[in-house]
Amino acid sequence: MMRGMPETVIFRQATAGDVPAIVAMLADDPLGAKREGHPDDERYREAFARVDANPYDELIVAERDGEVVGTMQLTYLAGLSRRGAERCQIEAVRVAASTRGQGLGRRMIQWGVDRARARGCAVVQLTSDKSRADAHRFYGSLGFANSHEGFKLTLG
Amino acid sequence: MMRGMPETVIFRQATAGDVPAIVAMLADDPLGAKREGHPDDERYREAFARVDANPYDELIVAERDGEVVGTMQLTYLAGLSRRGAERCQIEAVRVAASTRGQGLGRRMIQWGVDRARARGCAVVQLTSDKSRADAHRFYGSLGFANSHEGFKLTLG
């Protein structure tokens, strides 16, 4: 039986002041540790400013007792496919190490799915590194179909 | 040995007048046939207008002798991950049935990758339905790593 999350968790749009906590969560991860830098790196602040200014991007944090304990980014994608449907893409999902195993990730993704549904999105989509087997089971349990292969080309 | 494409193929941003040809290519596909509608459906025009107005979206067509024979959408995604790197996402890739097997898809994707590199994107990413085995070999041959699982949740 999973321990319940306290009801005091809220989900909200991130502010500039949340950036160091978000970067720390991105880096505290087997894959993220190799590619993230110092939270004060100016490039993080610049990226935050662009996301914050874009009406189709929402950088979300989960806050509990005044502390940021989770994050994800929602991007609302337009395109002609599926009769011009809007899709919601979820990226950069992290739960703070102190808070794992308490159901926060599940609540956060469900919150995002509900938000996408309320906007009228036709699809919620995300990719997960093939090494993250636990994440794959997690998304399957939330109703996501593992229907696609995800390809990346890193540019030098 | 693959036949060479004539040198008269150009890649350019789509205009509103290209929308019917793009929709026809989206629909002329085992998966697309089930989910696309009439090219005159107003939702396609609305989606085009949003893409066209967004500086981070580029709907591309390949044109040969005045005819649209290929399409793809490039979206430039911002986020904090990877030190705030911009990523290029490719979606809705199609080559007209009349033009398949002539290397146009390869040229089009390479054009997109070059464009992403010139902007300074750190990564080019895309997903492909698990049923499209030929596409998976194609992207692998272009240097893409099949590193991720792609999940979709269709909203009712």
Image: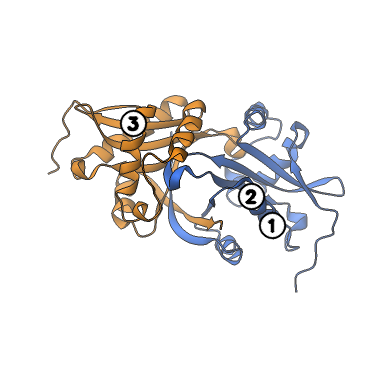
Chain colours: A orange, B blue
Distance, label 3 to label 1, CA atoms, is 42 Å
Residue, disc 2: B93
The answer to whether residue B81 is left or right of residue B97 is left
What is the tally of numbered marks visible in this picture? 3
- Mark toward the viewer: 2 or 3: 3
x and y percent of residue A18 in the render?
34, 31
Helix or strand or loop: what does disc 3 sit on?
A: helix
As drawn, A104 above or below A131 = above
Q: Quadrant of residue A26?
A: top left
- Labels 3 and 1 share a subunit: no
Q: Is residue B152 visible?
A: no
Label 1 environment density (alpha carbons within 10 Å; few <14, some 14–19, many ≥20):
many
Instruction: Classify the position of the N terminus of chain B by image quarter.
Output: bottom right
Q: Is residue A107 visible?
A: yes
As drawn, B154 above or below A140 = above
Q: As rendered, which of B87 and B96 lies closer to the eye?
A: B87
Residue, disc 3: A18
Badge 2: chain ID: B
Badge 1: chain ID: B
User: Which amino acid lies under the numbered mark 3 shown in the image of this protein?
Assistant: Asp
- Labels 2 and 3 share a subunit: no
Does the CB distance between marks 1 and 2 fall below 8 Å? yes
The numbered mark, 1 or 2, whose residue comes first in the sequence reads: 2
x and y percent of residue B102 in the render?
76, 63
User: Which amino acid lies under the numbered mark 1 shown in the image of this protein?
Assistant: Gly
Distance, label 1 to label 2, CA atoms, is 8 Å
Residue that appears at 62% across and 51% down = B117
Residue, disc 1: B105
- Mark toward the viewer: 3 or 1: 3
User: Which amino acid lies under the numbered mark 2 shown in the image of this protein?
Assistant: Val
